[in-house]
Image: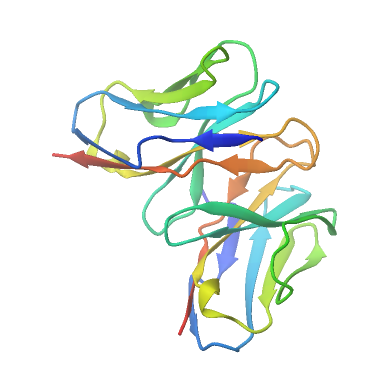
Amino acid sequence: AQSVTQPDARVTVSEGASLQLRCKYSYSGTPYLFWYVQYPRQGLQLLLKYYSGDPVVQGVNGFEAEFSKSNSSFHLRKASVHWSDSAVYFCVLRYQGGSAKLIFGEGTKLTVSS
Amino acid sequence: ETAVFQTPNYHVTQVGNEVSFNCKQTLGHDTMYWYKQDSKKLLKIMFSYNNKQLIVNETVPRRFSPQSSDKAHLNLRIKSVEPEDSAVYLCASSSGLGGREQYFGPGTRLTVL
């Protein structure tokens, strides 16, 4: 069955430090993958997306993610975090074709300490 | 810049009441969705609509019903709310059934007393 796992429910990093949020997926083909961010009391905003091609994709605000088919992973990275990056981050898998159903990970709550 | 609008932001009601939430998108998309986000932040799709036709109904309780007047609007009605309906309801839209990314509204937080 298709699924997305974010093994870290909570991550705390210091401002200016580097960040990696982990995501593992289960899907028989090559999926479409996304990272969304949800700030407190707000909806989800798209950070970046992977469809095909270059496994490293760039997103907004200095975020990037690397797709690995061999590891079934799509980890999110940022070189230097800011306090405003504190939010909940969701890794999301979309079926190719069909009803455009999205499968969400459980989310990782990021806290950036000053 | 918000392009998927939801009203109200918050709603508090009693068990058994009827509530209705509105969603409008200005992106020109023809597919819209409703998601439920529980207290643990878990998201699950409830409905999707393409060109005013229901495409997916993820076996939600019958008291929930989506209502669409045109492809830019998708409302959600709950006929008789239960305590377990307390959640954040998120509306989203995409371009066609093959549309890859979905764009979300800010959500409506429902509290059932």
**Which residue is at the front of the view, B1 or A52?**
A52
Which color scheme is applied?
rainbow
Left or right, A62 with reference to A56: left
Left or right, A102 with reference to A66: right
Outermost front residue: A1
Measured as percent of width and height from the top left, residue A43 is found at 49, 53
Measured as percent of width and height from the top left, residue B54 is found at 83, 58
**Which residue is at the front of the view, B12 or A23?**
A23
Measured as percent of width and height from the top left, residue A30 is found at 67, 20
Tell me if residue B93 can be seen: yes
**Position above or below: B95 against B66:** above
Residue B79 placement: quadrant: bottom right
At 52% from the left edge and 61% from the top edge, which residue is drawn? B107
How many marks overall?
Answer: 0
Quarter placement of the C terminus of chain B: bottom left
At 69% from the left edge and 70% from the top edge, which residue is drawn? B61
Tell me if residue A92 can be seen: no
**Which residue is at the front of the view, B93 or A12?**
A12
At 50% from the left edge and 27% from the top edge, which residue is drawn? A24
**Position above or below: B63 against A111:** below
Outermost left residue: A114
Measured as percent of width and height from the top left, residue A110 is found at 30, 41
**Which residue is at the front of the view, A77 or A9?**
A9
